[in-house]
């Protein structure tokens, strides 16, 4: 029987990974380790909470002693590490929080795995989930990020993730820790906290609030449905080669402004509003400092070597996403009350 710890399992992507592993592998014991920050929400795990192979541990990865004690107690065989501070805008206002969780927190987990696996690496794996943002930005439309693209992080968020990736590689090279890393493009889908572009737009369209678009909305992102990312994580965890890196992406590039227009169209139809209603809510706001122009992933390695590919076309995934938000009003209302309002007012007031 395998014991796996999934960090950040109450967050957006982590909750989909927890759901997939708990349901698909009843023979594994799944430990969801999460500090429940503003981004962590146990409502995301409600549907698996009663399963006998699911366990929740409230713990902060910056607390080295607690992490060490948990590894001693549970003797995990595998780590899927998703816990992170994940929002670029927040990293600009509080970079140190990103160093603490993303860098120190990752090293604490690496240290615990190294100590408790004590050189006996058979059947063990430390899987670090990272982002394409570590590669910097692209200007040439013909170019894509490859696994060999040099790191060039430009925001405190991507710098902290790049640093954590380097530590994971260093623990593999220096101590032989069995690690694997993936760098994925932007995810979208159910359970996404509405500070990120797609759920923020859906939330604001529902509530007839302005749709803040940075700069001229020219920035390009590659979008992947979160359940396809969770499927890729399952594939890499089981079949990925130790010491390797795999890029994950959807070959699905969109300019922010085009994406917002598409969402407005879908939402007008879903809400029974006249065509062109929601587009009028678009409000251009001062661009994010150091806003990367384009990210685009070349996902050929994982496709060819491990046989993974995205299952959903973007239009279908977006429609599923919108449907989820419209039928989960309570979830949306709960996460957008309290502190969210203070954050939102600070971010966009006066812009
Ligand atoms: P999220 O912000 O939705 O969730 C992060 C989770 O980590 C939350 O449940 C939070 O409570 C938990 N957490 C934060 N600090 C912690 C700490 N100190 N100790 C324990 N738990 C803590 O993030 P997400 O969007 O689900 O991203 C998950 C991972 O995937 C991150 O590592 C992120 O860098 C990476 N990633 C995200 C995307 C994306 O588009 N969202 C794309 C590629 C990679």
Image (cartoon, rainbow, N blue to C red):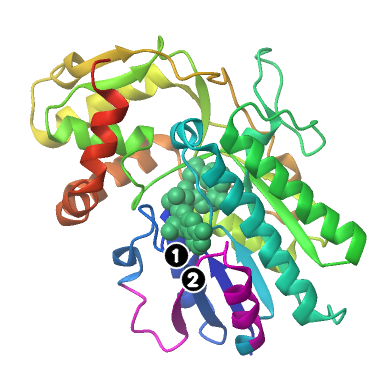
Residue 153 position within the rendered picture, expressed as x and y whole percent measured from the top left = 67, 30
| Tag 2 near tag 1, CB within 8 Å | yes
Relative depth, front residue between 42 and 227:
42
Q: Secondary structure at mark 1?
A: loop
Give left or right: position of 216 versus 212.
right
Quadrant in the picture for the C terminus: top left
> Residue at 71% of width from left, 73% of height from top?
112
Give left or right: position of 227 versus 200.
right
> Residue at 18% of width from left, 48% of height from top?
337
Residue 278 position within the rendered picture, expressed as x and y whole percent measured from the top left = 17, 21
Ligand 1 lies under 8 Å from the Cβ of mark 2? yes
Q: How many marks?
A: 2
Does 211 appear above or below 222? above
Residue 301 visible in image: yes
Precedes in sequence: disc 2 or disc 1: 1
Mark 2 — residue?
Answer: 59
Quadrant in the picture for the N terminus: bottom right
Residue projecting furthest to the top: 216
* Magenta region: 47-72
Mark 1 — residue?
Answer: 35
Determine which quarter of the picture holds residue 202. Answer: top left
Ligand 1 lies under 8 Å from the Cβ of mark 1? yes
Relative depth, front residue between 328 and 97:
97
Residue 126 position within the rendered picture, expressed as x and y whole percent measured from the top left = 72, 66
Residue 310 visible in image: no
């Amino acid at each position: 029987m395998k014991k796996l710890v999934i960090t950040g399992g109450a967050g957006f992507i982590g909750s989909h990974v927890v759901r997939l592993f708990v349901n698909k592998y009843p023979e594994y014991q799944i430990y969801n380790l999460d500090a429940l920050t503003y981004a962590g929400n146990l409502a995301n795990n409600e549907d698996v909470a009663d399963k006998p192979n699911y366990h929740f541990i409230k713990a902060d990865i910056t607390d080295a002693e607690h992490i060490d004690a948990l590894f001693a107690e549970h003797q995990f065989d595998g780590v899927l590490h998703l816990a992170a501070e994940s929002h670029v805008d927040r990293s600009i206002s509080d970079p140190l929080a990103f160093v603490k969780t993303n860098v120190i927190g990752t090293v604490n987990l690496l240290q615990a795995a190294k100590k408790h696996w004590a050189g006996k690496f058979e059947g063990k794996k430390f899987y670090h989930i990272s982002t394409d943002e570590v590669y910097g930005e692209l200007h040439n439309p013909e170019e894509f990020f490859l696994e060999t693209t040099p790191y060039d992080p430009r925001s405190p968020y991507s710098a902290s993730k790049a640093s954590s990736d380097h530590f994971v590689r260093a623990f593999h090279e220096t101590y032989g820790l069995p690690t694997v890393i993936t760098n994925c493009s932007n995810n979208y889908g159910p359970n996404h906290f509405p500070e990120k572009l797609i759920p923020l737009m859906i939330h604001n369209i529902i509530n007839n609030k302005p749709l803040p678009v940075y700069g001229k909305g020219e920035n390009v992102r590659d979008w992947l449905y979160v359940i396809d990312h969770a499927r890729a994580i399952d594939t890499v965890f089981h079949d990925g080669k130790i010491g390797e890196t795999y890029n994950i992406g959807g070959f699905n590039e969109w300019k922010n402004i085009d994406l917002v227009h598409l969402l407005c169209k879908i939402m007008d139809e879903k809400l029974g509003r006249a065509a062109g209603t929601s587009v009028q809510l678009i409000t251009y706001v001062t661009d994010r400092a150091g806003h990367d122009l384009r990210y685009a992933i070349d996902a050929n390695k994982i496709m060819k070597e491990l046989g993974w590919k995205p299952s959903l076309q973007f239009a279908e995934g977006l429609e599923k996403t919108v449907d989820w938000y419209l039928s989960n009003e309570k979830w949306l209302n709960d996460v957008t009350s309290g502190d969210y309002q203070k954050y939102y007012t600070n971010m966009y007031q006066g812009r």
